[in-house]
Amino acid sequence: MKSTLFNQLSAHPVLLALATVLMTLAVVFMALNLTGGEKQLEQRIERVHALDDPRFRHELGVLLGPPFIAGNRHTALENGDRIFPAMLTAIRGARTSITFETYIYWAGDIGAEFAEALAERSRNGVKVHVLLDWVGSAKVPDSFIENMVSAGVELRKFHPPHWSKLGRLNNRTHRKLLVVDGRIAFTGGVGIAPQWTGNAQSPAHWRDSHFQVEGPVVAQMQAVFLDNWIKVTGDVLHGPAYFPELALVGDELAQIFSSSPSGGSESMQLMYLLSVTAASRTIDLAAAYFVPDTLTSNALVAAMRRGVKLRIVVPGEHIDSDTVRNASRARWGPLLEAGALVAEYAPTMFHCKVMIIDGLLVSVGSTNFDNRSFRLNDEATLNIFDLGFAAQQTATFEADLARARPISHAQWLARPWHEKLKERAASLIGAQL
């Protein structure tokens, strides 16, 4: 009879000890990375205020941190052909400072163009600070980094691996923030990679939205960048180069807030739950990654039962993660049964992250509708209260919906057994998606 691996190791005490240590480290690593340190939201949130009640905005500000501020202007930018020129124009016009935090920064011409624009401004005396997620920027060429650093750009990586800090490997900065001179800012879903170039004209060019922001809320966006910059560097950026006096430039109320497992990881999900619970008429979700947990799904079903119309656009066959798509489809049943319209975007990867409620509140930013955004990543979301802006975003949502394929409850029930099997398997790691 062949001896077992355990018997073989038992005959060599040193090997057995080493194997025990390695196994223990593996268990600790899994425990640290697959669980969160903070208690999760577990109970349903009662409906107290309608969304158009000023007390709702007040409580949202109190619970999430910064208050809503008046006097802002927001410009919606669709797809790379409009997004990247606006961002690069702002960078090239910088006079005092640039702060830039992003998850995805890969190779390609657009990455080279951003690197050169940031380097050029630094060479001309602008204070440039770049924070890249270590995981998300794994594909950035060394030449891009060297170009920026040699020009004086302060560039840091968020959470590079280190044996003494294994617990943070699963915590990534997914925030997408660009602030120029403390006066003009950008946020949304776009990363710096070839997939975001073009005009969503083919599967090689993704559909996404980004937003240009002006007005007093830009200072809040700068503060969100500083939240992680201080964690990584210990340096506090302040003064008029970063926080100038900001005039009122529009009529839109806005607030940006952040979430992080190191503090307030429940804030993002709390905002979504409060907003869904406050909805009276409509909820429109453009969701690149839609994997709601039971609490969030129940809140959406409860909204529909009181008469709220729910519409959701998600990616279809063109998606960068089949696992996410499978885990998402596994959770549609209760929503479809309650009357939700769920449609898969057909032309290309759908990477938008926009929520519109009652034609009044628009939430945009880096946050996905999944557990990773709600509990594991560092995220930032911009909330805008404005009828005109919401109407514009509703029109954009409906244009995307027209290019998406609706899935009925009957179709969902009739999907093949092998699809159900893949969905069940993907759901097993739903907490990490």
Image (cartoon, grey):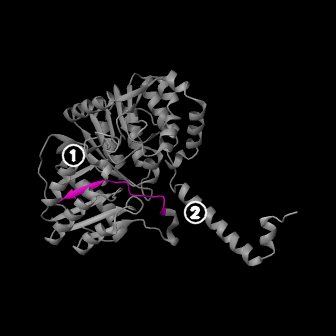
Q: Let me know if residue 48 appears in the view.
A: no
Residue 225 placement, left or right of 324 = left
Q: Is residue 175 magenta?
A: yes
Determine which residue is flagged by label 1.
81
Start-end of magenta stretch: 168-181
Q: Position of residue 102 (x, y in %)?
A: 32, 57
Determine whether the residue tagged by mark 2 lies in a helix, strand or loop: helix
Camera-near label (2 vs 1) is 1
Q: Is residue 428 left or right of residue 93?
A: right
Q: Nearer the viewer, residue 105 or 409?
A: 105
Quadrant of the image occupied by residue 272: top left
The reply to whether the C-beta atoms of the residues labelled 2 and 1 are less than 8 Å apart is no
Q: Residue furthest bottom?
A: 14
* Amino acid type, callout 2: Phe
Q: In the rendered view, does 193 fall on the left or right side of 241? A: right
Q: Position of residue 219 (x, y in %)?
A: 22, 55
- Say which amino acid is labelled 1: Asp
What residue sits 42% from the left and 65% below the top?
159
> Is disc 2 surrounded by few (<14), some (14 to 19) or many (20+) residues within 10 Å?
some
Label 2, label 1: how far apart the Cα atoms are:
42 Å
What residue sits 46% from the left and 53% below the top?
376
What type of secondary structure mainly makes up the magenta span?
loop
Q: Among all residues in the image, which is located at the extreme right?
A: 1
Residue drawn at x 37%, y 54% is 174
On the image, the x and y values in percent for residue 165 come to 50, 68
**Number of marks in picture:** 2
101 drawn magenta = no
Q: Which mark is residue 29?
A: 2
Q: Which quadrant is home to the N terminus?
A: bottom right
Tell me if I can see residue 79 in this picture: yes
